[in-house]
Amino acid sequence: MPRQNNRKSNEMREVFLQRRYQMYPHGSAYIEIGNTKVICAATVEDKVPQFLKGTGTGWVTAEYSMLPSAPILRAPREVKRMSGRTMEIQRLIGRSLRAVTDMAAIGERTITIDCDVIQADGGTRTASITGAFVALVEACETIYEVGKVFPVKNFVAAISAGISPDGEKLLDLCYDEDSNALADCNVVMTDSGEFIEVQITGEKKSFTRVDFNEILDLAESGINQLIDLQKDALGRDLVWRVGRID
């Protein structure tokens, strides 16, 4: 079955990633992956959750939302109660960013990343993680003190992969591919090749270890491409900060 824009099975959708997208946050980014579009903004506050007060360490958290008009069919605006899906996604984003952040280097501060989906065509959570990382690095630069540890230790990005109805392994699923997939997977990895999270589900049938390994290989290749784009977006003035310890 042909893919959108005649993509190959191991080919990602076109990606656009821009830093400094908004004026007021400490860090921000705009990411497009195919027709999925997300704005990510990072805000630094001089406070921490109660359980961290007096510890000298900070916290990184995330909030995720989708405009009602973002998906193909209008989604109700979440005003009074957050859906389980939204809660799951923002926890995933927060876990992914905390895994590459030195909380002691932040000090007693909280960095909140807002990820707002303005158009959805599959992969909103993975696009949010990839864009949020750029916003996080920008925000950390505003609190970094020369000669100390930079708070972000590694690059991190995320992407989806899955198995099509005819058994083909596909990278970077759009909405139609995701909704019809026999199995789909979201992978979060660092630039050192370490996994932070792997979410895989056999939606319509079980899958083998061989299938799983092939999906992970596809995802890793896509994540490496995304990390290269993150580095391009951050530019020379920031990319060298990540992982700096002096």
Image (spheres, rainbow, N blue to C red):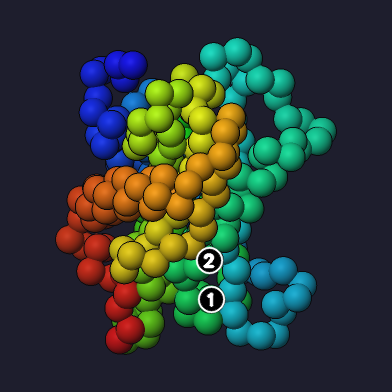
Give left or right: position of 81 versus 34: right
Q: Secondary structure at mark 1?
A: helix
Numbered tag placed on residue 103 in the rendering: 1
- Please, is residue 232 above or below residue 192 in the view? above
Q: Quadrant of the C terminus?
A: bottom left
Q: Quadrant of residue 193?
A: bottom left
Could you tell me if the residues under marks 2 and 1 are in contact, i.e. CB atoms within 8 Å? yes
- Please, is residue 238 above or below residue 187 in the view? below
- Please, is residue 149 above or below residue 68 in the view? below
Q: Residue furthest top?
A: 73
Q: Secondary structure at mark 2?
A: helix
* Residue 156 horizontal/vertical position (percent): 39, 59
> Which residue in the protein does label 2 denote?
98
Q: Give the mark nearer the N terminus: 2 vs 1.
A: 2
Q: Is residue 175 visible?
A: no
Q: Residues within 10 Å of mark 2 (few under 14, many from 20)?
A: some
Write the residue at 75% across / 75% down: 51
Say which of marks 2 and 1 sits in front: 2
Write the residue at 23% across / 28% down: 8
Numbered tag placed on residue 90 in the rendering: none
Question: What amino acid type is highlighted by mark number 2?
Answer: Arg
Q: Residues within 10 Å of mark 1 (few under 14, many from 20)?
A: some
